[in-house]
Image: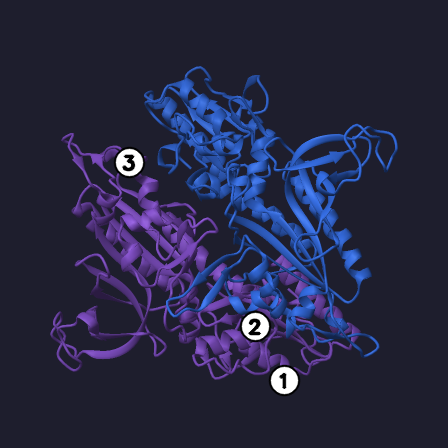
Chain colours: A purple, B blue
Amino acid sequence: MRYSKLFGKTLRQPPKDATTVNHRLLSQAGYVEQLMAGVYTYLPLGLRVLRNIEQIVREGMNELGASEVLMPILHPSANWKLSKGWENIDVLFKVKSRTDKEYAVGQSEEEVVTPLVKSRIQNYKDLPLAVYQIHWKYRDELRSKSGILRGIEFLMKDLYSFHESQEDFDRYYQKVKEAYLKIFAKLGLTVKVTEASGGSFTEKISYEFMVLTDAGEDDILYCDDCNFCVNVEIAKVKEGESCPTCKKGALKKSRASEAGNVFDLGQKYSKDFDVTFTDKEGKKQYPVMGCYGIGISRVMGIIVEKHNDEKGIIWPESVTPFKVHLIGLDLQDEEIRKKCNDAYRILNTEYCVPVLFDDRPDTRAGEKFADADLIGIPHRVIVSKKTGDKIEYKKRSESGSKLITMGELKELL
Amino acid sequence: MRYSKLFGKTLRQPPKDATTVNHRLLSQAGYVEQLMAGVYTYLPLGLRVLRNIEQIVREGMNELGASEVLMPILHPSANWKLSKGWENIDVLFKVKSRTDKEYAVGQSEEEVVTPLVKSRIQNYKDLPLAVYQIHWKYRDELRSKSGILRGIEFLMKDLYSFHESQEDFDRYYQKVKEAYLKIFAKLGLTVKVTEASGGSFTEKISYEFMVLTDAGEDDILYCDDCNFCVNVEIAKVKEGESCPTCKKGALKKSRASEAGNVFDLGQKYSKDFDVTFTDKEGKKQYPVMGCYGIGISRVMGIIVEKHNDEKGIIWPESVTPFKVHLIGLDLQDEEIRKKCNDAYRILNTEYCVPVLFDDRPDTRAGEKFADADLIGIPHRVIVSKKTGDKIEYKKRSESGSKLITMGELKELL
């Protein structure tokens, strides 16, 4: 991609209303543009990151053996009335048609996925069954001020599983937990798994995958010596007290952002939508259901909150929009221009590496470097009069640069 | 993909309310499930087709040099009030928040894309500018009875272009028209380009890309001898009259479905949102804007309407969910089972061909063949006791089959 042709270039100033790091950096670097509080347009750079995160999550779900579907955003009100979500969920957006038909705007999809599996579960051999989707969701939030961390409109992966017994659900939950930890590690995030309250419809405990960050909207207590972690909402311990699990560490308190969650839904929706199966003894049973979310757009925001410095974003390799930021200097010089174009072509077509090529002829070096730091692509390559037959290579996360050959660059990447 | 693990298998009967071919076949074959009129869930097979169509359209747009973005579905009402769409567009869904904020649900995105480009167009050098997205749209349709041809919720590619002059727009329109014809040809569709009325806000003529099909909702008049084609809504000629362009053929009338369209929006939205640029003479001007749609989910329905027989769907190679449908028979026999698994592995990992493998051990041959015909994958391969060291190969679109080796199959694919 040539920077001169990129739609959504860096801005001189961040938007005035950008109070969080992710909103400020993602807007200024040209990844997103806020349309209104909690609702964003993804510009070409941002869309590439979003798709990369999506793909990592998708691969994790496919490894679990879950099937990808795409469910509607617009739902018949009848389904939400059946589950009592219509009256009880205050963040549910409602729409009325010209002919007074009422619809819910999907904020979660239990009300669609449960009737969807109904005809596809007959007996215990059809279980466990797991389907997921990656799709936009809507919540009528009163406050949406954390950039893309807390959207009214947000992209989410939601997985639903159905089981013949609580024991089978518990086994599956462990598998999903491991898959989640692997996914978050790939995304460059360290998560703490907390217990939390189960939400509107269940007294069961849910699990949250929390990333420590000041931009978060939850408070957690955690132990540095073991995995103990709890949301303060339901904690029976306090900051500074010794860890109830390992008895060694003193509990610390931190702000955190929920990157994923897991709910044990029990038989609520199975019963609401009368989904049954015949068990091994020939008896009708309601399957036990689980729901597992990962906030894809939120994760993009969390990654920026965790991976940045005073100059801009520092993308992990796994989600970066481009692998290499190629900067051409002295482009008035025909020979240098040719060298740049050659390097761009070789990286793109021979090394098959996605490259953003800053080909602006009249922009000064300092501005190009500042833009590269802001955009945050992990590998920077400079071609200029000074670099001669070599190129100058620098990692975004390190300060030193070095002169290397294109062959050495290939090895590095 | 093993059929035994596929979520969304074929149904014995099509849904009772399926009155169109696409609704009937896509539902019965396990591609989609209707949630309510005009709103569908895409099952794994359907999602694969949708993504294939998306990708063909995306490549066409990228070849045009357009930039892919992703704009919100939820829009501030203020933007729609500015364009007068809030009062004048009867298919616009409106949502109110808990705090009485009003939102529009995107039925088209001029109201978002125009302010988005505003800060990015300063002078004539920034033009032409073209951005597109592939995203879900919503229209409060009174009748949604044509399967996925006419959705309340539907997936669309919408491209918007901005130009310094009407002449530049006209040139660009020709380029888009050629790109569209290439895209539709790749999708296995023959389109007629008609003139039609320009919709709510313009007296300019729009162009529609129509596919002749009884399931369509428009009537067109066309000439078999040349490209002449017109929507009867604005036609000044009648069926049977001689063609006004080539004077040779007699005009025919047909039902047709609109797979794509092009609108010359003039300066309406540029003026509404006060988007200006400085021209070569240093004067402020409003850019001329164009809007170009392709209905991705509708195209999926149209393809089914055009490519089917009494047994089921016959997918074009370009969009088929899998390239090969491998059917294992006599799977109680361990040796045959091994041969099947080998063929599956070789196709998948050595030939890198996407395969649907009917591995059901207890299903009779006739049912497997009927399911394969219904699902419509272009290449069918059978491994059974009868096929010995070879495999039986049959094209979905042809009646004869033949025994060939795996090596010959590789050549064929």
Q: Residues within 10 Å of mark 2 (few under 14, many from 20)?
A: many
Q: Nearer the viewer, residue B29 or A399?
A: B29
- Quarter residue A300 falls in: bottom left
Say the numbered circle drawn on residue A402: none
Give the mark toward the camera: 1 or 3: 3
Chain of the residue under label 1: A
| SS label for mark 2 | loop
Whether pointer 2 and pointer 1 mark residues with C-beta atoms closer than 8 Å, the reply is no
Of the numbered discs 3 and 2, the one sitting upstream in the chain is: 2
Q: What residue is shown with label 2? A: A30
Q: CA distance from mark 3 to mark 2?
A: 47 Å
Say the numbered circle drawn on residue A366: 1
Residue A397 shows up from this direction:
no
Q: CA distance from mark 1 to mark 3?
A: 62 Å
Residue B95 shows up from this direction:
yes
Q: What residue is shown with label 3? A: A121
Q: CA distance from mark 2 to mark 1?
A: 18 Å
Callout 2 amino acid:
Gly
Whether pointer 1 and pointer 3 mark residues with C-beta atoms closer than 8 Å, the reply is no
Give the mark toward the camera: 2 or 1: 2
